[in-house]
Amino acid sequence: MHIEQLDLETRSKIYNHTKKVLRKYQKGIVTGKLTADKFADNILSNGSIDGILDEEILNEQDFKLSYISYIETLINIQNENLANSKKKKNKLIPDKPSITQRLQLKNLLSSTGYDLTIPLEYLNADDVNNIMDYISTNSIALGNERIYNYVHKSTPI
């Protein structure tokens, strides 16, 4: 089983756990001493992810390969964010969603019965696009699992 085939809640839990460990070993990752292969082997072998997935899935070679690829994706995103934050002259401020994007998101949320769990002001344009894609297709691109926690189904009163 590949990581893309897991349900969104499980992927979100894996994302949160993996990001937490990535932040812990950020220096080793940036210097290149800790590769995605070693990182995946450490996470899969130390049992910290056992509560999220069955051991049967964890031992599959297909899952291990897809998890290594997933970690490489997260490392690339993290390295890109670090490189951008170190540029002092060109501080990149994430683009705020346009008024059109805000209106489209609000209309989509109200028509599909979803609510935002965080204020719209805290979302950037990419987050808004990813949320709209998630609501429309019920799938999230790898590395964007954080948006799973940004929306939820409305509960009728």
Image (tube, grey):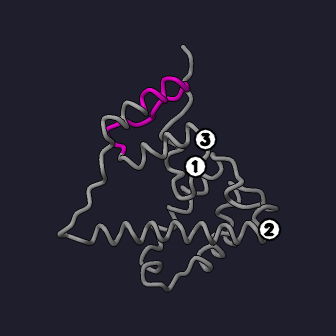
Badge 2: residue crowd in 10 Å (few <14, some 14–19, many ≥20) = few
Residue drawn where x is 69% and y is 66% of the image: 47
**Alpha-carbon neighbours of circle 3 within 10 Å: few (<14), some, or many (≥20)?**
few
Q: CA distance from mark 1 to mark 3?
A: 8 Å
Residue to which mark 2 is pinned: 60
Q: Which of the two residues, 14 or 136, is positioned nearer the viewer here?
A: 136
Residue annotated with mark 1: 140
Picture layout, residue 80 above or below residue 143: below
Q: Is residue 41 left or right of residue 94?
A: right
Residue 128, how many percent across, how many down? Answer: 42, 42
Task: Give the SS element for disc 2.
Answer: loop
Residue drawn at x 54%, y 55% as measured from the top left:
16
For discs 1 and 3, the disc positioned in front in the rendered view: 3
Identified by mark 1, the residue type is Ile
Badge count = 3
Looking at the image, residue 114 lies above or below residue 156: below
Q: CA distance from mark 3 to mark 2?
A: 28 Å
Residue 5 on the magenta span: no
In the image, which residues are magenta? Answer: 105-123
Residue 11 % position (x, y) = 63, 53
**Residue located beneath label 3 in the image:** 137
- Alpha-carbon neighbours of circle 1 within 10 Å: few (<14), some, or many (≥20)? many
The kind of secondary structure element at disc 3 is helix
| Residue found at the far top of this picture | 157
